[in-house]
Image: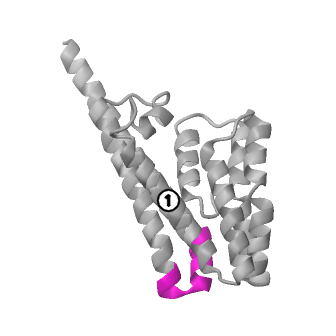
Amino acid sequence: NRCVGAAPACALSFADHGTHRRTDSQRMQLILDYLPVVAFFVAYKQADIYTATIVLMATMPLVPLAHWIFTRQVGRIYLISTALVLVLGGVTLALRNSLFLIWKPTLLNWAMAAVCLGSLYIGEKPLIQRLLQSAVELSKAQWRQLTVIWGIFFAVAGAANIFVAYRFGESAWVNFKLFGLLGMTLAFMVIQGIWLAIMVSRNERESTSGAE
């Protein structure tokens, strides 16, 4: 569900809503998820990174608040992402150094990668299975494969964020936050959808042949 520096949340949101029929409230949630990153982008283009940081810090808490209003619950990823924005944004403003804020998406993505991969060994079910099992049926091995795929995506997204920032500079990084991370997320969801379709079709054929 979720985005300035929260590609994990955005990807999970696409996965969750993408495997269910969306209601009007879910569509509104997705729009609100992108409010902070769009506001950050506009503020940066109109002013500078520090004004954009203030705008981000002001709008980011609206995301978990909106989810509470619509669903009466707030996922941990929203709270963690918001807390990171407030803490690292505050340090960025205090020290006048944007690198603290720039590292936020990378830290969050790498944390999600660690959680995904760690869930293969800790807990009864992998993280992605717990999130998506109500929408699709896969074998135990396939759920583990999908969780590894998600872990790799989060790791790559985190690395891409910091690579763009250090290699191409602050302005390119701001553009990447809005367009690059979103593009990566959309591409990943398309690839995941194709993979799921192949796996589900294979499972159905095996089930049918087994019944015969």
Question: Could you tell me what secondary structure mostly forms the magenta stretch?
Answer: helix
Image side of residue 171 versus residue 29, left or right: left
- Spot the residue most to the top: 212
Q: Quadrant of residue 142?
A: top left
Q: Is residue 177 part of the magenta span, yes or no?
A: yes
Q: Is residue 190 visible?
A: no
Q: Is residue 130 left or right of residue 6?
A: left
Q: Residue at x 69, y 35 (%)?
A: 23
Quarter in which the C terminus is drawn: top left
Please tell me whether residue 75 belongs to the stretch shown in magenta: no
Q: Position of residue 114 (x, y in %)?
A: 41, 52
Q: Which residue is mark 1?
A: 109
Judged from the image, the secondary structure of the residue bearing numbered disc 1 is: helix
Q: Height in image: 82 above or below 93?
A: above
- The image shows residue 114, relative to residue 91, as above or below, that is above
Q: Residue at x 55, y 58 (%)?
A: 7
Task: List x then y, in percent, for residue 30.
Answer: 67, 49
Q: Which residues are magenta?
A: 165-178
Query: Relative to the observer, which residue lies in front, 115 or 191?
Result: 115
Question: What x and y, as percent, mark residue 166?
Answer: 49, 84
Front residue (pair 158, 177):
158
Amino acid, disc 1: Asn
